[in-house]
Image (cartoon, coloured by chain):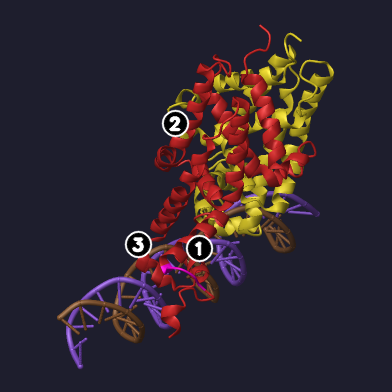
Chain colours: A red, B yellow, C brown, D purple
DNA sequence: CGCATTATTGACCGACCGGTCAGTCAGTGC
DNA sequence: GCACTGACTGACCGGTCGGTCAATAATGCG
């Protein structure tokens, strides 16, 4: 009686596979691959450990599935970044703010991907580059290049470098918040992503705008 | 007979404690705390596992000692960064290049510290901020401020933000090399830190220099 | 030299690891 | 009714984990 109707029982919710994936993503993001035991995943997901191995062939397969899941969820969220109108400054500012907000809102996924990057495994890094970062980064560079053609920013700057700098600044903010909080010169920024983005774009723009009077 | 003279025997070298610390630093930097077993450290150091526990009370104590060791070695290497002469542009360029080179040359230490940052433990991050980054970062900000007072860069930019941007760009280069290699727009930069620094400073400077003609 | 101190070791421990297995159970088609 | 299936479980496996301990080798000192 209680089974067929109560799809979401209090201790759990949703399909078991999804619960396992969600638990795995959370724990892996928090502590990394090696620090997470299958028992911990099972407990958080509300299933038996053996059940995890029924759905995933190994711990590594579970990790990869959680990564793929997180990346798949992450990619399309960037789509609305380039569609804004306004001056180039405004569009860039919008992108910077939206990208940083995206990192902060999806902290779990961001951490998971970040952990993958720092492991530096060549194959995994290639997959990340091609399947996760590639499109969005290329799109950002394309925005820069189109801005250059329209004369909205200096033609002699490296578009890839500008894009890199923007992403780098945001990644750094995301991963160094806890440290920055204790650096007196930047404490006022570590909790205020909007202010951070504003200063970032200000510095960036006055470097990539064409000289005002020449 | 062979002991007192042969300080550096082929399989090992130096004091056992130092060998243990070196092995621990290498392995922890490569794979992280949880992925490294005491057996692995013992094997690489050429001592028994029990001997490690004779010199260090626990795995965590060994990790902390290795971290402290790495940080202690890392800090003074920054000292020669600010002492250069030349224009402000030249000094900043020198700092950017030297800092990035420092990261790359001490890859092991850099990775170790980076892993610590990403864990986001409040206490550890505070220690890192106060004992490792604090002085050097404050010094970099001071350089910026003095440049502002001398009119060598815009007075209305946030000195802390400029310093952050510089460090962020270098950290990002260091930790994303393997990924950048597969991003067609920046492949030419991912293996050339000198070119990267040049482009970085170029973009940075034209943003923080006072307007040329006004 | 004897003697205390330290450095080092192999054997060992309980706990936990990733993973397996035999089997229970609810649902479904016939 | 029955056969079959996939989700699911508790008990269990070999192996490794961090850590302990008694015993041995080396060392410094009177």
Q: Which residue is mark 3?
A: A57
Q: Position of residue B159 (x, y in %)?
A: 76, 28
Q: Which residue is mark 1?
A: A23
Whichever of callouts 3 and 1 sits on the residue coming sooner in the sequence is 1
Instruction: Look at the numbered discs 3 and 1 and tell me whether their residues touch, using CB distance below 8 Å.
Output: no
Q: Which residue is mark 2?
A: B183
| Measured Cα–Cα span from mark 3 to mark 2 | 32 Å
User: Which span of residues is magenta-colored?
Assistant: A12-16
Residue B150 in view: yes
Q: Chain of mark 3?
A: A
Secondary element type, mark 1: helix
Q: Position of residue C10 (x, y in %)?
A: 48, 63
Task: Return the residue nearer the eye: B18 or C8.
Answer: B18
Q: How many marks?
A: 3
Q: Residues within 10 Å of mark 2 (few under 14, many from 20)?
A: many
For the N terminus of chain B, the image quarter is top right
Nearer the observer, disc 3 or disc 2? 2
- Which residue is pictured at 61% across the width and 44% down the height? A101
Secondary element type, mark 3: loop
Residue found farthest to the right: B149
Instruction: Look at the numbered discs 2 and 1 and tell me whether their residues touch, using CB distance below 8 Å.
Output: no
């Amino acid at each position: 009686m209680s089974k067929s109707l109560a799809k979401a029982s209090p201790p759990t919710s949703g399909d078991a596979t999804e619960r396992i994936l969600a638990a795995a993503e959370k724990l892996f993001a928090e502590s990394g691959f090696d620090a997470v035991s299958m028992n911990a995943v099972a407990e958080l997901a509300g299933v038996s450990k053996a059940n995890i191995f029924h759905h995933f062939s190994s711990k590594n397969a579970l990790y990869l599935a959680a990564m793929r899941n997180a990346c798949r969820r992450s990619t399309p969220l960037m789509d609305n970044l380039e569609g804004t109108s306004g001056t180039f400054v405004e569009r860039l500012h919008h992108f910077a703010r939206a990208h940083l907000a995206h990192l902060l809102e999806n902290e779990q996924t961001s951490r998971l991907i970040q952990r993958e990057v720092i492991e530096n495994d060549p194959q995994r890094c290639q997959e990340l580059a091609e399947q996760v970062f590639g499109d969005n980064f290329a799109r950002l560079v394309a925005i820069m290049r189109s801005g250059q053609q329209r004369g909205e920013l200096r033609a002699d700057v490296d578009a890839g470098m500008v894009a890199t700098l923007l992403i780098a600044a945001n990644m750094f903010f995301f991963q160094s918040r806890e440290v920055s909080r204790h650096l007196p010169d930047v404490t006022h920024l570590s909790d205020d992503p909007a202010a951070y983005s504003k200063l970032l774009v200000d510095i960036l723009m006055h470097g990539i705008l064409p000289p005002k009077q020449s």
